[in-house]
Amino acid sequence: MAKYWKRNWDIQRNEWYNEIATNDKLTTEIKFKKRMIKANNFNEIWGDFIKSEYLEVKRMIFPRFYFLSNAELLEIVAESKNPDVVQSHIKFSQECEAAMLSSNSKNEMKEDLDDLISVLEQLTEIASDILPYHKQSTLEALISLSIHNRDILSLLIDQETGIKDFEWTRQLRYKWHECNLCTVIQGYASFEYGYEYLGCSPRLVITPLTDQCWLTITGALQLNLGCCLAGPAGTGKTETVKDLSKALGKFCLTYNCSGDLDDKVMAKLFFGLVQSGSWCCFDEFNRIDIEVLSAIASHLQAIKAAKDSLSVRFVLEGKEIRLRPHCAIFITMNPGYKGRVELPDNLKSLFRPMSMDHYDFGMRAIKTVLIRVGQRHQELKLQYNKKRFSAMEETLITIDILKEVNLPKLIAEDVPVFEDIIRDLFTEMEVPKVNPKRLEARAGVMLVGPTGGGKTTIRTILEKALIIFPLVNMESATKLDVFQNNSKRSKVDTFVVNPKCVTIDELFGQTNPSTMEWSDGLLSSAVRGFAKLGIKKAKRKDPSLGETAVDWQWIILDGPVDPLWIENLNSVLDDSRTLCLANSERIYLSSAFRVIFEVDSVSQANPATISRCAMVYV
């Protein structure tokens, strides 16, 4: 049916265009009026179709469709036979427990530790080779988990821990049962493993603080509560939840909240969560309007009551639906930031609070340095065909990246101070000069400087340089080749807008309250276009160059920073690279997508945004 409506509309539109192209002006005007009447009638029928139970039935059959907008779901249903449209390590604890139960437990555990260290050394050796991305990612995740296992086993040996001691029971561990089900246990909480396909996804480095957070979260889930993670930006609130979902084999949806969200969109998300048994982490939850938060509280109370009574089905928003008891809802907040509201008491009672302000430094800044060090390692491995680097070379790479990441953030007066700090840290090293690569470091770059200071000129020069960059390093390339060889060039698509000259609805889009139809804004429309282009052709490889010609996609926001609109881009600027719209739609972006801000000051921006962006002072 959906395919029929979509095809019928395409036919009607094409006929209209053809008639206009082949008739004279007077005839065209007459037929234009007739076509407008016919189009309006068709739109009324189409609106009734959208509002009907058709799409709701599809969502009831497969609850994850609740996470999609009407337009996205309609495209999938209409092209259900086209896979291109539809598709846009567990560790176990038996050895540890067997060793603790044996008569010579300490020696048994030491043998297990030696075996684990041996495996870890082998994995590290393999990871030092030049590998495809998916193999490298899998090995890095396996090494991260193995290092955590090694640390736990060392601690258990040092403290001579028994199988019933808290130091062991507080660890997240896995057990197989006779019925061939895997159970995840931590403390007094136990969960069925979800078997969600995770792919070659990276894993979080698990620290003692991560273990404490997980213990708090699993304890809350056992009581059918959500968890509220509060703390400054960049302390790992969202990533902690996402990595725990991977450990439990659950699908976790992350959604960046804004003041434009209404109770209908939130109710649709809850319908999908409770029926599919998924997890959802609502970032910046206290940005939602207080009236909407009150409605959300009533939905969450109904879900918790159904869980407490072990119901199989329950009523939500007047509709009876099935309940998957392993669904979970998490929220993150940045208390004290601009544009935040206080949660109602009845909503607070449904979440176990947890503070994550244990760090006095920015985790995102450290992560950026580590990622760039890893990228530089890969570049040098390919360039010099080396597996390992000496301690001196490792130090030089680290100094190089530290300067690359931090120097553009500093004003001229602070540069000598930073140079002195680097010399004090690396006393026997000669600090090299670097060429900062801010576009490679972050998804968002802020050019900060006064009006007329040359921000736009700098950006335009960089844009032109990136186009011919793949040809510059060719030994055989002449100046004529550089300017005439279009097939080997990179490409930079740009969209420029002043975000303060339009309203937030005109920038990000809005839903018509009468027809419930979504209309894209200037920014969301441009991002959607870039996303579709990125799916078709994210990059072009030229074997003769040995390089990758990148098709860059730039959104340029030339205007003052305002927390009211810029925080809607937080999920675009972090690792998820996803634009969350008020109609629950999530637009995924390619690795070549960048947001460039041209601003005169960042005094009005919150740390949540600043920590996600690279800074260049002009």
Image (cartoon, rainbow, N blue to C red):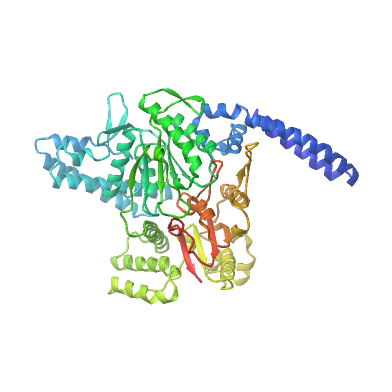
Q: Residue at x 51, y 52 (%)?
A: 569
The residue lying toward the viewer, choosing from 458 and 118, is: 458
- Residue 267, can we see it? yes
Q: Quadrant of residue 253?
A: top left
The residue lying toward the viewer, choosing from 395 and 422, is: 422
Q: Is residue 225 left or right of residue 171?
A: right
Q: Quadrant of residue 20?
A: top right
Q: Quadrant of the N terminus?
A: top right
Is residue 397 shown above or below 101? below
Q: Residue at x 71, y 30 (%)?
A: 45
Q: Is residue 393 left or right of residue 465?
A: left
Is residue 427 shown above or below 220? below
- Residue 544, can we see it? no
The residue lying toward the viewer, choosing from 82 and 251, is: 251
Instruction: Give the image location of residue 375, x and y in percent.
Output: 41, 59
Instruction: Give the image location of residue 435, x and y in percent.
Output: 45, 70
Q: Residue at x 29, y 39 (%)?
A: 91
Q: Is residue 583 left or right of residue 230?
A: right
